[in-house]
Amino acid sequence: MNPAILDVRDLVVHYETSRGPVQAVNGISFTLREGERLGLVGESGSGKSTMALALMRLIRPPGRIVSGEVLLEGENLVTYSEEAMRRVRLGRIALVAQGAMNSLNPVLRVKQQIADGLADHRVRLSSRELDERVRDLLESVGLRRDVANMYPHELSGGMKQRVCIAIAISLRPKLIIADEPTSALDVVVQRQVMDTLLKVQEDLGASIILIGHDMGLMAQVVDRIGIMYAGNLAEVSGVHDLFRVPLHPYSKLLIASLPSLEVKGAFQGIPGLPPSLLNRPVGCSFRSRCPFAMDRCAVVEPLLREVEPARRVACHLY
Amino acid sequence: MPALLEARNVTKIYGGGRFSRTPGMVALDDFSFRVEDDQPTITAIVGESGSGKTTLARLLLGLTEPTSGQILYRDQDMSRLTGESRKRFLREVQVIFQDPYEVYNPFYKVDHVLSTPIAKFKLASSKQQARALMEETLNAVGLRPEETLGRHPHQLSGGQRQRIMVARALLLQPRLIIADEPVSMVDASLRATILESLRQMHLKYDISILYITHDLTTAYQISDNILVMYRGQVAEAGDVDLVVKQPQHPYTQLLIQSIPQPDPDRAWGHYELPADAARPVVTGGAFCRFVNRCPHAMEICRTTNPPLYRTDEHRAAACFLYRESPALDRADLDQVLTDPARNLTPTGT
């Protein structure tokens, strides 16, 4: 088994509001190995994007990391100075955000935007070396070299998203965090962009955390899935195990709620709503929607435990 | 019998006026479609961005006018609706938009979106009756009135807000609901619930539904007929089971292969787009709209825009691969759409 690249331990992130803290991430722990593809899925408000930002230390007030550790190759990022953290971003952890393509500067050529990241991380290159570097990066994401001299408006959405991937890998990061990298794209383009992302990830030998809510995409792309619910991990399982036999009741219902192209009328919603993160209920946060809820679920919060080899579930059923 | 709502050879071009240096962008290109009054159906209009599906919704709602062709409501030109007939149209054709966060005025309680149509269309004669009507429609979409009424929009989830929009549409007992991406902004666990309330309305109240979406999977789940749009034209249309299970147009095939299946054992496969495929959208003109991405492109595809070929009784595809089949005038598309009565018995399974 490959060594761990990232080890998140009991991470807690709150957003302070006048009515008390919103407990967006409520004590999450997981390990990511070198070269591994981990998916984090959950509905809106489950804390998945907050997780992505917390790993990059990009949580802004009123949000803050309350406690926990983010160990990147054994070093705790939570205690890093802002300047040290700035070097980690892009250098060792890169983020491809949702709608990243809209973050390109409309008045700068693609080449300049790639060069900015390099210069900011003190990579000194002659103009010829820079041209070569930009060309190699663009080619590695399947774009022609003349894209370097184009402006963002001359590119399609899929091409812009690939430019963002090129920027993300420009310093050969060890970890790529992709937060819904294709949610704004059409399915055909989505497949190309995902192919590109996975190819560069393999070329770099980097690990990837893919965040999203599209279970279909997860099934096609990742090795392991963490299912998030109300700021906690409900289940972490290998992708094949999870789709074959989901263990947590929320995973079961979530997978049953997916419409299929095979059978008609086989999908149904999950009744009820996730709890307010302002007043987190005592016990299991899923119990009000859970068909298997027991007395114990109202009292004791289930912890994520290994219930089968390589499968961790937070549920009193196991 | 006149159709409830009909698009007749409709073309919509944005920009490209007399003083413009660039040609216009053809958003919808010679499109014809009918929604019958006496045969309620659920029809899905599927396409990626730039396929013309939202333009179509706006045209059918009378929010924009066609460049050429006509939109007819009960045989009357939409742009000339006045007085009673306009009021009747506003009541009979309802819309549900994509974004449940933007359609509410944050200053008003959510009751406002229900009480306004009740007042405007005089649906109730007293406050108690209005309240009862609001509660009844909320119940019909699976919301508990006591948890919904009296609240402000920000106190409700996206799924709840979208269901209130469904309730609002239902309140007016329309003949047709045009739902433009109604579930693309709500969570997967709620999608099924919202689509199910739409389908229940169709079954219980004989309301036709035009489900506009980019999501072929949910389209397959709820509709009888499907129109696959590509760059302003119908690429393939017909019975949803035929189109989804045995797609014929190369674009439909590509679309279906590209959907990531929630099953890790069924690999996505790899597909390389031809290099020029990412060029800006080209519309209008005498060539197949899909030619620069098509693996089967032939010489004729570059010089002639393919007509619809009727490849099955209940399906047509605009592709020269099927030129042995009889051509179908785009204006007669409704001939291949299945009679929903047929779908009352389970189809082909």
Image: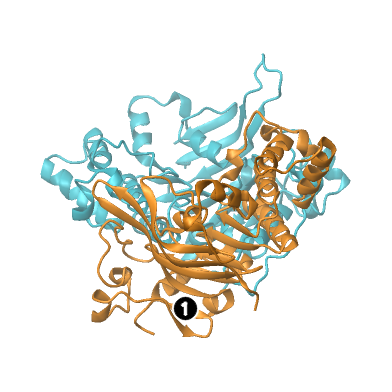
Chain colours: A orange, B cyan
Q: Which residue lies furthest to the top in this view?
A: B19
Q: Which quadrant holds the C terminus of chain B?
A: bottom right
Image position of B3 (left or right of B261): left
Instruction: Classify mark 1: helix, strand or loop.
Output: strand
The front one of B345 and B257 is B257
Residue A238 position in % (x across, y down): 56, 76
The front one of B259 and A12 is A12
Residue B269 position in % (x across, y down): 72, 65
Q: In this view, does B37 lie above or below A221?
A: above
Q: Residues within 10 Å of mark 1 (few under 14, many from 20)?
A: many
Residue A265 seen in the figure: no
Image position of B151 (left or right of A285): left
Q: Is residue A76 above or below residue B297?
A: below
- Numbered disc total: 1
Residue B315 seen in the figure: yes
Which of the 4 image quadrants contains residue B277?
Answer: top right
Q: In this view, does B175 lie above or below A272?
A: above
Say which residue appears at 31% left-offset and 35% top-offset. Answer: B105
Image position of B228 (left or right of A50): right
Which amino acid does the dot numbered 1 rest on? Arg
Residue position for label 1: A312
Q: Residue furthest right?
A: B299
Q: Which chain is disc 1 placed on?
A: A
The front one of A82 and B38 is A82
Q: Is residue B144 above or below residue B31?
A: below
Residue B273 position in % (x across, y down): 77, 51
Residue B207 position in % (x across, y down): 39, 51
